Structure formats: C-alpha cells, structure tokens
Image (spheres, rainbow, N blue to C red):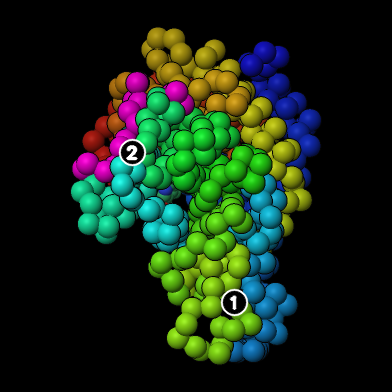
Amino acid sequence: MRGFELSEDFALKLDREDPLVSFRSRFFIPPNTIYFDGNSLGLMSKDSEESLTRVIKEWQEKGINGWLDAEQPWFYFAEALGAAAAELVGAEADEVVAAASTTVNIHSLVSSFYKPAGRRKKILADELNFPSDIYALKGQIALRGLNPEENLVLVQSRDGKILDEKDIVNAMDGTIALALFPSVLYRSGQLLDMESLARKAQKKGIIIGFDCCHSVGAIPHRFDEWDVDFALWCSYKYMNSGPGSPAFLYVNRKHFNEQPLLAGWFGCDKEKQFNMTLDFCQVNSAGAWQISTPGILGLAPLEGSLKILREAGIERIREKSLRMTAYLFFLVENVLSGIPYRFGTATPKEPERRGGHVALQRNEDAWSICQALKARGIIPDFRPPDIIRIAPVALYNKYHEIWQMVNIIKSIIDNKDYLSFKNKKAQVT
Ligand SMILES: *Cc1c(COP(=O)(O)O)cnc(C)c1O
C-alpha cells in the first residue's frame, strides 16, 4: 500500500500507466455513471453484443440447422465455452462446461458427490456463505432422508466478517462426507486458501467443492493442481455475460465415472444422444452434469466475454485488481477513516487473502450513504446491515473513478447529504 499519493493527478497518472486501459472502450459504460457493481452484474462488452447479435442472426437465417451449421455450432456451444473458460480456472478443456445456473449446479454436483454412509454423513459449510448455497445443501441432506439440523455443520466466523482456515480444517473430522466453500466471501471479500483446504480435505477423505462466483474472471485458479473435486460459478459477475447468464461447472477428471443423479439427455455422449435410447449414455467429461438443452441465446454473450478475458489475461487482470483495491484501501485510510467519516474496511488487507471487491463498513448510516452515492451517479451495492461493497473491475474501471468516489463520499458526509435518504428501502440492492 506504499507508493500511493492522495492527489487527483496521481490517480490520473495511475490510469496513464495502466497496461489494460484500452479494454474499457470495449464496454458499454452506463452514461454519467461510475460503476462499481461488477461483482453483482458485470457490464456488457461490445464483444458480447457481437456474439449475441451473430447468434440471433443465425437463428433468423438457419432455424434448426443452427445446431450443426452455425459458426459455433449450438450443439457444441456449452462445451466450447467450457474449454475456453478452463484456462481461467487451471483445468483441462473437458473438465469445464457451461451449464444451468449456480444453484442448480450445486444441486446437480452435490447430488452425485454427497454419499453419506456410516459415520460420515455430514456436509461442512460456513455461516458466511451466500444463502442460496446453504438452502441447496439443506435440501440435499433432506433428500437423503437425513435431518439438515444435525447434518449440516457450519463453520462459525470469529468476527462476523471472515473465516479462519484453521477453524475449517479443525471441523474436517471423520463425520464429514462433503465440504462446500465459497472462494471469496460475498460480503467481506475474503479469499479463502482453496489450495490448502483442498489438500487437507483430501487427506481426511472428504470430497471438497468450491463456489467461485466471486472469483472467476477476477483471480487465477489452479483447480487441477490443487486437486479440487468439483467447482461451479456464475458468469454474470466478473465474467460480464449478462443478467442471469448461464453458469459453469468443473469436475475433476478423476470423477468422470461418477453418476450424475439429476441426469438429463444433454449429459449423453453426443454421438449417441440422438439414438434416443432409454439407457443414459454418459459422456466421459464434465459435460455429463449438464441436464437440459442449453439456452443458446443466454450462452451467446459468453463467447465475447471469454474472448476479452483471455486477451487481457487473468494474471494481468489480478495484478491490476490488486493494485486498484490497494489504492482504495489507501484512500479510505487517509481520507475516510477519521471523525466524522468513520469508515473502516471488512476485507483482509493481505493480497493473497482478498478477492476483487472491498467491503467498506460503517456502523451508522451505511445504507443512506449508499443511496446518496447512487443519487450522485455512483453505483456500489449494499449488504445489510453495514457494508457498502465496491468492486473496481480491472477490465473497465479507472483509478480516477476510485479517487472520485472516495472524495464524493467525503463530500456527502461533509454536507450531510445522506440524511434525506434515511428511511428509503429497495428490493434489489
Ligand atoms: C452470485 C452467487 C449465487 C447466485 O446464485 P444463482 O443460482 O445464480 O442465483 C450463489 N452463490 C454465491 C456464492 C454467489 O456469489
């Protein structure tokens, strides 16, 4: 965090020196807006618009023939996108496929990999995970006729913000059959040490999976090297592929012979799928965990997003993201931490322990300050009760925008602008 300066000129200088600066012009930036919500919904790129427009045209011109004759034949689209995404997560091409949605993929993978037996009946997760993941795990336990109250073990946080990996490892005992953890915690932005957790789980005979919604597209992963069993993630956050765009799943090839229990005909070997036999001809790849016909119009923008991500390179993206969040920490500490501003951060400061966003924390009035920021054209997001999340995205945000935001927060507090937003509520935050 050393080497930064407080002046506006310094922010502009950081932008001039940014090797990824040219990527911003490939995105649609909402007019008069500083957008820091790419960890909830990434912005659309022109590359995504182009791949979507092409597929729309192919539907118009080819009808059903698009399944085999489109530029990227639709029949193989989900696999092709999986192969392109594999390099972002350190996997082989056939270990990743685009499929369904995050929560559906949790159900689909956990239904295969959760095999409660004897003493080993429990699932290990944590109390800070995204609620949908926990609902899915409880449902999976109940489906086996077991009681979720007894069989879902949630690792507790010591401070309500972050998890201690030692507490996770200590909970990995002989009663745990499967563990599922987020790569990056959605509120505090803590990045868990996936490698060490995967190695410990393996040593203890526990199957481990990761929900990487908040890390793919922002951080490099090495699933194969770390020997992760399975993983899944959405594509609408740092992968910029559109509201509710399809998710991805990863299955370590050592598990290709496991059975997808939420099976569907898109998990068949493609050579045999249209033989329409009633025996499931499982493909020997992660593709087996697809269920239904993929929504091709939903997949189409992913082609453009992956093109940009691979061109920029995930290592360079991570490097810039860390520099941006370090700069944000520096400004918050120097401009917003004293009285009357009283901002703190809930995100770990060590680079290897933080993801792509920073959680600003303020005991009072965080919600109304967030609303006042929105009224000034700055889009953060809010996670109750006291967190304002700021995601400076390497592909399209500027250092100068970080500088502007911090100084606008300062003026909102100096002028007490936030007081007029005190009692407003919203449904999507
Ligand atoms: C974004 C996110 C989800 C969203 O789930 P959907 O099924 O895509 O609605 C789930 N879990 C985590 C950890 C997330 O970050």
Q: Position of residue 88 (x, y in %)?
A: 67, 48
Question: Is residue 228 visible in this depiction of the protein?
Answer: yes
Q: Residue at x 23, y 47 (%)?
A: 148
Q: Position of residue 411 (x, y in %)?
A: 46, 22
Q: Nearer the viewer, residue 233 or 43?
A: 233
Mark 2 neighbour class, 10 Å CA radius: few under 14, some 14 to 19, many 20 or more: some
Q: Which residues are magenta?
A: 149-166
Q: Is residue 47 magenta?
A: no
Q: Position of residue 335 (x, y in %)?
A: 52, 15
Q: Is residue 415 above or below residue 87?
A: above
Q: Is residue 145 above or below residue 72?
A: above
**Quarter assignment of residue 307:** bottom right
Quadrant in which the C terminus appears: top left
Asked whether, in this view, residue 54 is left or right of residue 140, the answer is right
Quadrant in which the N terminus appears: top right
Mark 1 neighbour class, 10 Å CA radius: few under 14, some 14 to 19, many 20 or more: some
Residue hosting label 1: 269
Q: Is residue 239 above or below residue 227?
A: below
Residue hosting label 2: 175
Residue type highlighted by circle 2 = Thr
Q: Residue furthest top?
A: 339
Asked whether, in this view, residue 110 is left or right of residue 284, the answer is left
